[in-house]
Image (cartoon, helix red, strand yellow):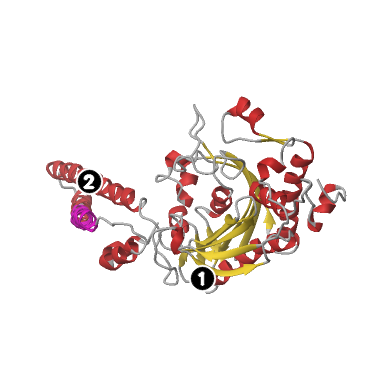
Amino acid sequence: MLDPNRFRRELDETASALARRFFDLDVDAIRRLEADRRDLQTRVEALRNQRNVRSRAIGKAKAAGEDVRPRLGDISRLGEELEAAEQGLGEVRDRLDAMLLEVPNLPHPSVPAGRTEAENLEVRQWGAPPRFDFEPRDHVELGSGGMDFDTAARLSGSRFVTLFGPMARLHRALAQFMLDLHVREHGYLEVYTPYLVHPKTMQGTGQLPKFEQDLFSVAGHDLRLIPTAEVPLTNIVRERILDADELPMKFVAHTPCFRSEAGSHGRDTRGMLRQHQFDKVELVHVVRPDDSYDALEELTTHAEAVLQRLELPYRVVVLSTGDMGFAAAKTYDLEVWLPGQQRYREISSCSNCESFQARRMRARWRGPQGRGTEPVHTLNGSGLAVGRALIAVLENFQDASGRVRIPDALRPFMDGAESL
């Protein structure tokens, strides 16, 4: 969430910044609640002071041997008034907090203004899309035999897949390759995380309360299936105060991800592009505030390194204000070339959330001089989405016969096999 002080001291400026990402902040409602909060806070403090003054006076009278019973009724009435005022203050604070939890992050000044992905700006390209002297197949045709959607539908319904044999092994090889690269060369700490988390954990990274409909819940338990490993990885620092020498932290995890795709409205129903369950290797950084935009560039290059080692052509785009995720202040998308669609498609989003998630998680750090604490900055990115990487390998390395060359980087994980 945003710093609550912004809504007390810079409300109009905050509303203007949020308007860049087409969010209409209810300024009047916040002003009314803030006025109520201030009035109740003043009343609570005044009543506490009165009660303390009278309690001390009763104590002195008692010590002097005076009869204090007539004064006890006043203390009781003050206590009841104070309790009512505190309850009212708590209700107003809860209403303010509920409003602020629905407010997205502020966009960084460098983020281009725009409502949709059409306003995203290309930053760079790497590699050239392959040229074929035949009509390229898409991954569904190329995966025939090892990529079975009918069996998955019988087991679970639509938007699931079952992989068999070499196809399953290629999927596993991709995840193993990514993990090894990030741990051995990029300096990440590998983490095995829970796949089920409390709602409070989801709230910490911004999935709740706004995106409840996108999550899968466990009947009979107050738990949600993770939509990305970003959720448990980032929450590792929840409710902690970190010392300066603990930062930066860099975590990586390979997990399944579960999403209801409530807002997809029938998009990408063919194949593996948009599924209820998919695997991802996720990268998370926890850093000092002054370092977070350098960390965003580093994180993005780490995700790019995967595509480069796999020899997959891609481009990097900076997302416009209207296309960014709820918690992000700035996001780079990596889009890999898919010959089956003749277009670039997202395979990784790398975001700097600044202090937005840290405030929700109460994650702070203490500077080297030990003078007070402040929220850390958190970043996350896919390094990469495993299923989409599988699609990209199949489509970019196909030949006219339907065979698929295995990139050199994956062959050690495939017993040296050169093709599928």
Q: Is residue 52 above or below residue 319?
A: above
How far from the left and from the top, in percent, is residue 32? 19, 55
Rendered image: mark on residue 88: 2
Q: What residue type is labelled 2?
A: Gly
Number of marks present in the image shown: 2
How far from the left and from the top, in percent, is residue 46? 18, 56
Circle 1 packing at 10 Å, graded few (<14), some (14-19), many (20+), is: few
- Looking at the rendering, in which quadrant would you find the N terminus? bottom left
Which image quarter: residue 347?
A: bottom right
Residue occupying image coordinates x 74% and y 62%: 309
Q: Is residue 194 visible?
A: no
Check if mark 1's residue and mark 2's residue have beta carbons within 8 Å: no
Query: Which badge, 1 or 2, is on the more N-terminal residue?
Result: 2
Label 1 secondary element = loop
- Which residue range is magenta in the image? 27-47
Label 2 secondary element = helix
Q: What residue type is labelled 1?
A: Gly
Which image quarter: residue 141?
A: top right
Rendered image: mark on residue 234: none
Residue occupying image coordinates x 87% and y 48%: 415
| Residue where numbered disc 1 is placed | 370
Q: Which residue of the protein is positioned furthest toward the left in this rendering?
A: 70
Q: Which residue of the protein is positioned furthest toward the right in this rendering?
A: 416
Q: Is 189 included in the stretch rendered in magenta? A: no
Main SS category, magenta section: helix
Alpha carbon distance from label 1 to label 2: 36 Å
